[in-house]
Image: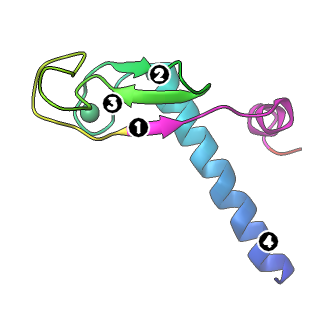
Amino acid sequence: MTKQERETERAKRMARHVEAQRITAHGMCPDCGTKLYRNLALSGWWQCGRRGAPGFQKEAGPACDFQLFYDPTPAEHAAIIGGGQ
Ligand SMILES: [Zn+2]
C-alpha cells in the first residue's frame, strides 16, 4: 500500500467516524428521520426505531433497516476531536 493509499484509507475512516458521531449526537435516523435507539446487546449499537418486523418495532411505521456501530476507542475519539493531530 502506498503512502497515498494509506492517507486515503485514513481519511475515509475518519469521515465515517465523523458522520457516525454526527448521527448519534443528533439521535435521528438519516434514512427516515425516526428516533434512534441503542441496542444494549452490544456497546455502540444504534438502530432505527422502525427497524424490525411489524409489532416488534419501537416505533410503528414503514420498515427501515438503518443501524450503526459507533464505539470509538479513546485514541480514535481524540483523533476525531483533535482533527487528526
Ligand atoms: Zn430509519
Q: Sequence-wise, which precedes: disc 1 or disc 2? A: 2
Mark 1 vs ligand 1: CB below 8 Å: no
- Kindly identify which residue carries mark 1: 67
Mark 3–mark 2 distance (CA, rounded to whole Å): 14 Å
Q: CA distance from mark 4 to mark 2?
A: 33 Å
At a point 53% along the width and 41% down the height, the residue shown is: 19
Q: Are marks 1 and 2 in contact (CB under 8 Å)?
A: yes
Residue at disc 3, secondary structure: loop
Circle number at residue 29: 3
Q: Quadrant of residue 17?
A: top right
Q: Is mark 3 within 8 Å of ligand 1?
A: yes
Q: Where residue 25 sits: x, y (%)?
A: 51, 21
Please, what is the three-letter code of the amino acid marked with disc 4? Arg
Tell which circle, 3 or 4, labels the residue nearer the N-terminal end.
4
- Foreground mark, 1 or 2, reads 2
Location of mark 4 (residue): 6
- Is label 1 or label 4 in front? 1
How far apart are the two marked residues, 1 and 2, measured between alpha carbons?
10 Å
Label 2 is placed on what type of residue? Answer: Asn
- How many marks are shown on the rendered structure? 4
- Residue located at (35% from left, 24% from top): 28
Q: Secondary structure at mark 4?
A: helix
